[in-house]
Amino acid sequence: MVNQSSVVRRRSSDSVVGRWSLVVGQILLALSVCFLSEAAWAQGKTLVLKGGKLLTISHGTIENGVLVISAGKIAAIGAANSVQVPKDAEVIDVTGMTVYPGLIDSESYLGLTEISAEGSTNDLIETSDEIMPHMHVYDAFHAESELIPVARLNGVTNAIVAPQSQDTLPGQDSFIQLDGKSANDMLLVRDIAMPLNFTGEQRRNESWEKRKFPQTRMGLAAQLRQAFIDAQDYSERWSDYEKKKSEAPAKSDDKKSPPSPPKHDLKLEALLPYLQGKRPIVLAAQEPSDLETAVGLAGQFKLKFVLNHISHSQSVLDYVAGLKVPVIVGPIYEDPKNYERYDAVYKLPGELYKRGVKIAFASYDAHAVRNLPYAAGYATGFGLPHDEALKAITLNPAEIWGVADQLGSLDVGKTANVVVANGDPLDVKTDVKRVFIDGREVPMKSRQTELRDRYSR
Amino acid sequence: MSRVNTLFSFAVVGLASLQAWAQQPAASPSRNEVLIKNAVVMTVTHGNIQNGTVYIKDGKIAAVGNDVSAPAGATVIDAGGKYLTPGIIDSHSHIALDDDVNEATSPVTPQMMMMDAFDYQDKAIYRGLAGGVTTSLLLHGSANMIGGQAIVIKHKYGASRDAMLFPGAPRSIKFASGENPKRVYGGKDQLPSTRMGNFAVQRAALVEAQDYMREWDDYDAKVKRGDKDAKPPKRDLKLEALADVLRGKLMVQIHCYRADELLTEMALAKEFGYKVRAFHHALEAYKVADELAAQGVAIATFSDWWGYKQEAWDAIPWNAVISMRKGVRVAIKSDSEDFARRLNQEAAKSMRYGGASEEEALKMITINPAWIIGVEDRVGSIDVGKDADLVLWDGYPLSSFGVPNKVLIDGDVYFDRSLPGFGMPRYKEGE
C-alpha cells in the first residue's frame, strides 16, 4: 500500500482532492482486504466455545453461553439452548471461564521498541524536527517483536501504535492486531490518526545552553499554526494548478505551454487529510491551559479530534464534556501534582464517565501493554463502574477508532478476537487461558513462557 | 579490648551512634487506645480472622482475635467487614531524597548517608501512605558499585523529620553491579566500563578496607605492647564504612540483575566474609534460585517490569513465585514513586503468575520486605507486640480493586480516604 500511495503521489495530474480520495479509497480497500483476508492464514474449521460466561459488552452477560467462530468471524452467539452447534465444529468446553472480546489498547509503542535502553532497538520518535507528520509508524513496525506475544497473552488483541510524544506532530498512528504472519497482516489501518502533542514536553529547552526554537509554548503553537497554514496554501496551489490544467485548451497545437505542477512536499501533504477532517487528530494535553490552547488551535483549523491524557485538568472537566469528544485517559498511574490529592488522576476516568464523556484506556507503553486491563480495573476503585471500565478497553476504543463494525464486542459478524480467562478480565489475579485473533487460536507462548518453562523444572 | 582498638571502635561507634541518634524516635505522647472491630484480619503469620478485632495500646498491637473486647474509653473503628492488613513495606525506594539519589562521581561511596538528603516533606511519602505503605527503605542509587547508607522511614506524613525515622532500624548499605555503574563511568571513559571493571573496583575497595583494618589492628597491637611511639592511622570515613561491612555491622543490599552476577556477588561475599541480605531487582533470580536459597539471600524484585534495558530482557513475571518455591524469601518492591502507590496490586500478580496463595502474595509486601530491612520483629504482620501499622481496605487488597480506606502508623490514623483535602488528619497544607 505504501508503494501504491507513492505511485498515486507521483501522478501529479490528479487534483489534490482527487488524489487524496484515491489514497483514502485505497486505504479503505486495503483495510477491508485486511479484515477479510483471514482465510489466507486461518484454519477452515468452525470452533465452538461452550459453557462460558460471555461478556458481550454490547448486549449484557450470557451465562452458560455458546459462541461459534467460523471463517474468522463470530458466526453465532447466545445462551446454550438457543444456538445451534454446527455438526462438524470443534467444540471447546469453557465451562467456568469468562469469555470476552479482545482488548484494545488506545496508545502503545508495540513494534517500535525492543529494549528501551538499547538505542539500536528503538524506532520511537524522530526528534530532529517538531513537525513530522510524514513519519508513518507502519514504516518501522516490527511484526516479529518479542513484546507482541507477551501482550496478547493477557488478552490484548488490538492496539494503536503511536510514535512517542516529544514532537508536537511526531507522525501518524497505525491500528494493529497482535497476530499475523507479517506486518501487512497485522497493520489493519495505516495512518489511522495523527497525534498533536501540546504538553510542554515538546519544548526544546532541556538546558539554557542547548535551547533552540521552539523553546516555549508560544514557539510550539506558532510553529503548528504556520505548518497548518502552509498546508492550506499547498492545497490551494494544487487546486489552482488543477483548475488551470482543466481550463487549458486540449489542442496540442496551442502555443501556450501547459501549467506546471507545484513541487511536492510530503510534510504538508501528510497534513491534508486532517485539515479536511477525514481522520482524527489525537490531541494531547495535561493541564487546563495547555488543553485550551490546543483545543483553540484545533478549532482554528477545524480539525476533528479526540483528547489524550488531560491528567491534570480536573478543574475543567465540564468544559471537556462540552467539547463532545472522546478522551483517551491516563495513564491513570501518572503521579498527581503536589497540589493535587493522591487520587486526582485515579478518579479522572470515573469523573469523565459521570459527565457523559466516552473514555478509553491506553497503556502508553510497549512492555506493559499486558497491564492495560489492570489500569481499567484500578479506576473502578475510584468511581468508574466496572462495566464501563471494561467497555473502555473494548467497545469504546473500537468506536473511537472507527472499527466498531468489526471489533470491540461479541456480536455476530464481527472479527473473532476472543479471550477466554478464568475470571474477571480486569483483575490482576485472572489468568488468560486462550486467545483467538481473527478466529485463529494463538499459542499461549512467548519468550517469557519459554524461559519460565526452562527454569521452573 | 585495647585502648587503641577501643579508639578505633569509638570512631566507628561514633558513626554508628550518629546513625543511632538519627534513628531515635521523638518521645511519643501517651495515646488513646484504639479498637478496630468487625474486620477480616489478614495477620500474615497466623491466617485470616473473620469478624476479627485488633486492640491497639500505646501504638502497639495489644490483642488480636475474635474475643477482644473494647476497654472503656478506647476509640472504636468499625471496619464494617473490610479487610485489615499490616502496613505495606517497601524494601526499595528512592523517594524523599530530592533527586539526591546517586553520588555518581566515584564508584565507591559508602560514606554517603541518605539521612543527609532526607526530604521529609516530599509528597511522595504521602502518596505512598495513601497506597498503604507504612515503612520504606530509602536507598542510594545504583550508579556506584558501593553506594551509600540507607535510612528506614515510617510514612508519618506531617510529622517531624526525626519522628519519621524507624527507631532502632538496622543499618543497610547499597551495592550495585551490572549495566548502571558500567554506563555511568564507562560513559566518562573511566573505570569501570565493563563487568570485569565493576567487580575489580568492588574487590579493590574491599581489599583496601581489609588493609585499613589491619593498619588499625597493627596500631592496636603496638599500643598493647606499650609502644609509645605508635601513631594511629589516619581515619577514613569511606574505609570505616567498608570495615563495618566486613564486620557485619551493615546489611548489604545489592542491586543486581543477571544470574551470573548474582553468583559472582555471592562468591565475593564469601571471599570477604560478609553476608548479602538481599539482591534487589534480581530479575534473573529464577535461574539461580537454588543457590540463593542455599545462601539465605532474599530478593526484592518487580512483579512484571521488564525489557527496559538489556539486563532486564530475561525478566519474567514468574520470577517471584519460581524463586519462592525454591526457598528464596521474596519481596515485591517499588523502586518508583509510581509502583509504591499500588504494591498490593503488584503482589497480587504473583497469584496469577505462578499461583502464589493469598498469604504468600501478602508476605511479599509485608513480612518479607520487613526481613530484608531487618525489622521483621517489629512490623510486617498483625501480631501482639508489633507496631500498630495497619491498613483497612476498600475492596479486596490482593486485586485490581483494593484501595486503602485508612492507614494507621503506630496506632495513629495518618490517612483516611473519607476525609476531604489530602485525607490526612495529622497534616495541614501550608504547615
Image: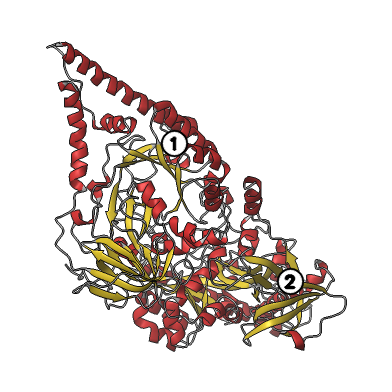
Image quadrant containing the N terminus of chain A: bottom right
- Category of crowding for the residue at label 1, using alpha-carbon neighbours closer than 10 angstroms: few (below 14), some (14–19), many (at least 20): some
In the displayed structure image, the side of residue A358 where residue B176 appears, left or right: left
Tell me: residue A262, above or below residue A365: below
In the displayed structure image, the side of residue A144 where residue B267 appears, left or right: left
Tell me: residue A302, above or below residue A363: below
Residue A405 visible in the shown view: no
Q: Residue at x 19, y 47 (%)?
A: B22
Quarter of the view holding residue B201: top left
In the displayed structure image, the side of residue A317 where residue A271 appears, left or right: right
Label 2, on which residue? A438
Label 1, on which residue? B186
Residue A91 visible in the shown view: yes
Q: Is there CB contact under 8 Å for labels 1 and 2?
A: no
Q: Residue furthest left?
A: B228
Colour scheme employed for the rendering of this structure: secondary structure
Indicate which label's residue lies in the foreground, 1 or 2: 2
**Residue closest to the eye, B79 or A196:** B79
**Residue closest to the eye, A408 or B377:** B377
Secondary structure at badge 1 equals helix
Q: Residue furthest right?
A: A88
- Percent x, y of residue A105: 57, 70
Amino acid carrying label 1: it is Gly
User: What distance separates the C-alpha of mark 1 from that of mark 2?
Assistant: 48 Å
**Residue closest to the eye, B228 or A397:** B228
Secondary structure at badge 2 equals loop
- Percent x, y of residue A63: 66, 83
Amino acid carrying label 2: it is Asp
- Percent x, y of residue B101: 32, 48
Quarter of the view holding residue B156: bottom left
- The chain to which mark 2 is attached is A
